[in-house]
Amino acid sequence: MIPKIGLFDVTLGVLYLFIIYFCAFLYRDKKIKTNPEYKYFIIGLTAKLFGCIGFVLFSVYYYKGGDTFVFFNAGKGLSHYIFTDFGSAMDVMIASAENLNLYQHNFAPAYNYILKSDDVLSIVKITSVINIFSFNSYLIASIFFAIFSFFGLWFGYSNMCKLYPKCSKYMLVAFLLIPTALLWSSGILKDTVTQGCIGWMLFAFSNLFIFKRKLFFSIGIILIGGITIFFLKPYLLYVLLPCLFIWVQANLKNIVKNNFIRVIVKPIFILILVGVGTFLFQEISSGAGKYSGDKMEKTLEGFHSWHEYLAENRDQSGYTLGEMELTPLGMLEKVPAAFNVTFFRPYLWEARNLPTFLGAIEGLFLFVYFMYLLMTLRLTFFRIIFKNKEVFFMMLFATVFGVVVGISSYNFGALSRYKIPATMFFVLSLVLIQAESKKEKLLN
C-alpha cells in the first residue's frame, strides 16, 4: 500500500521543520565559535532534508513501490501493536526473526512473508518506534530517518575537519552533498540508518584513538553503531571493522608517545587487533544469516538472479560483468570491472530512468575528477595513498567495499544504494589526496 501525503502530513511537516531549524540555528551559533566547520551546518542539514523530501516524492509519485513502503507499513502495524498489546509487542521487539511467532504476533499479516529476515525485522522495529513520534506519517517518519543519518555523518565530518581544517568545504561534498547518496540514504531505508552509523563510528574511533576524549561515550557509540549495522547489513562490517582497525594501528604514534615503548607495543598491538578482528569476523559471520561466510556464494547467486529478473521483467537497469565463477580467483579476475561499475557507471547511454540518469551524471563527474588527479599527480597519487593514514584507510575501504557491491549487485538501481558508503570514502580520499599534494608543493 502506497502511503498518502495529505494536508495533515504537510502541516505537521512544516511544524517539525520549523522546530528542527529553530534548534539547528541555536546549535550552530553555539558551536561555530570554536568549530569553524559549523558554518556549513545549515547547508548540510538542508541538503539532507531536501534529499529526504525528494525521496518521499519520488517513492510516492514516481516509483510507486519499493522496500520503503514495506518497512513503513509493517512498522505502522507494529506501532499499533505497541498501543494495543504492549507486552506482546515487547516480545516482538526482543525476538529474532528466527524465533518470532508470526501466528501469535500477527501485527502486519500482509508482510509476514518478508518478516522472517533479521535485517527486515530490525528496520521494521526501528520504524515502529519512529512512527509513534511521527503520528504514522510517512513524510514525518522519513524526516526522522534523515535527521538521524545527518547527525551521524555530521559528527564524522566534524572530526575529519579537525584533522584537515582546510578541506572542510570539499569534505562536506563527500559526506553530505553526493546526489545519489542524498536520494537513497535520506528516507525509510536500511541505507539511511547504516550510513548514519558509519558517520557515528568514524566520530567515535577518531575520538578514542586520535583526540583521546569522550572515552565511554565513544565506546557506547561504537557498540550501538556496530550492533545496528550487524542487524541491518552485517556484510558491511566485514570490510568496515578491518579498515578501522588498520587506521587505529596507523595511529599508534598518537596513542603511544614514547618511541621505545612503541617499538615494544606495536607487534603486540597488531597481534591483538588481528585476534580481535578474527574473533569479530567469526562472531559476525555466525550470526549473519544469509550473509555468513559459508552462505555468501548462495546469497550472491540469489542477488544475481533477482536483479537480472528485475532488469528483464520490470524494466530496471541491469548490468553484467561477463561470465564469472563465484570463487575467490573468479571474483578476483572481475576486480577492475567491478571497481569501474561501482564508481563510474552507469554510462549516460545506459541510463533507462531518472535515478540511473542521475547516477550516470555523477559517475561521469567522478571519473573526470579521478582521471584528472591520476594524470596530474601520477606516482604522487599512489605515494600519498600509502603515506597518509586517513587516505589509506578511506581508499582501502572504498576499493574493497566498492568491488564487493559491484560484483554482487548486477542492477544499477540496487548498486546506487549499496555503493553509498564506498562512494563517500572514495570521494573523501580523492579530496585529501589533492589537498596533500598541494601542501607538498607549498613545502617544496
Image (cartoon, rainbow, N blue to C red):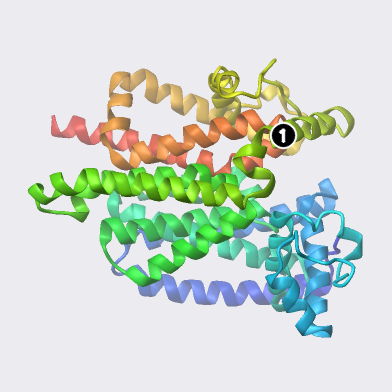
Q: Say which residue appears at 74% left-offset and 76% top-offset.
A: 91
Quadrant of res 403: top right
Q: Say which residue appears at 67% left-offset and 32% top-offset.
A: 297
Q: Is residue 45 visible?
A: no
Q: Is residue 53 above or below residue 17?
A: above
Between 442 and 284, the one lying in front of the other is: 284
Between 153 and 204, the one lying in front of the other is: 204
Q: Is residue 359 above or below residue 325?
A: below
Q: Is residue 421 visible?
A: yes
Quadrant in the picture for the C terminus: top left
Q: Secondary structure at mark 1?
A: helix
Q: Which residue is mark 1?
A: 298
Between 366 and 100, the one lying in front of the other is: 100
Q: Say which residue appears at 40% left-offset and 34% top-offset.
A: 430
Q: Is residue 132 above or below residue 258?
A: below
Type of amino acid under label 1: Lys
Query: Left of 154 or right of it: where is 386?
Result: left
Between 355 and 403, the one lying in front of the other is: 403
- Measuring from the top left, give residue 50's x and y in whole percent: 63, 56
The local crowd at label 1, few if under 14, some if 14 to 19, many if 20 or more residues have their Cα within 10 Å, is few
Q: How many marks?
A: 1
- Measuring from the top left, give residue 336's x and y in whole percent: 53, 20
- Measuring from the top left, give residue 434's x and y in whole percent: 33, 33
- Measuring from the top left, give residue 60's x and y in whole percent: 82, 54
Query: Left of 207 or right of it: where is 417?
Result: right
